Image (cartoon, grey):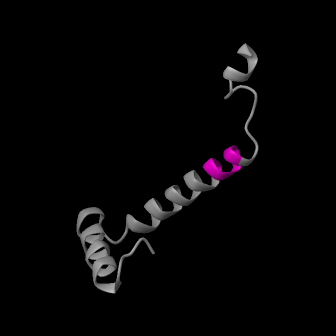
Amino acid sequence: MFGLGLPEISVIAIVAILIFGPKKIPELGTALGKTLRGFKEEMKTPSDETNPEQDKQ
């Protein structure tokens, strides 16, 4: 995964827990998942409102 090994991932996880706290991590993960899901759906089916350049041509 992006060339990261187990030690690097462990350090990142420890820093995240220290910064956000163990109770906030699941909330952040849920919000990030919803954001990525919405982004992927929008990339698959772009709406007419988000593409004004197509109207100009």
Q: Residue at x 44, y 60 (%)?
A: 28
Q: How many marks?
A: 0
The x and y percentages for residue 32 are: 50, 57
Q: Residue at x 45, y 75 (%)?
A: 1
Looking at this rendering, what residue extends furthest in the bottom direction? 6
Q: Which one is in front, 41 or 20? A: 41
Specify whether 10 is left or right of 48: left
Residue 7 position (above or below residue 17) = below
Q: Residue at x 64, y 49 (%)?
A: 38
The x and y percentages for residue 39 are: 61, 48
Q: Is residue 11 magenta?
A: no
Specify whether 16 is left or right of 25: left
Q: Which one is in front, 33 or 2? A: 2
Q: Is residue 56 visible?
A: yes
Corner quadrant of residue 49: top right
The x and y percentages for residue 57 are: 74, 16
Q: Is residue 52 visible?
A: no
Looking at this rendering, what residue extends furthest in the top direction? 56
Specify whether 11 is left or right of 28: left
Q: Main secondary structure of the magenta part?
A: helix
Residue 49 position (above or below residue 32) = above
Q: Find the magenta span and give its range.
A: 38-43
Q: Residue at x 73, y 38 (%)?
A: 46
The x and y percentages for residue 18 are: 23, 69
Corner quadrant of residue 33: bottom right
Residue 2 position (above or below residue 36) = below
Looking at this rendering, what residue extends furthest in the front direction? 57
Corner quadrant of residue 7: bottom left
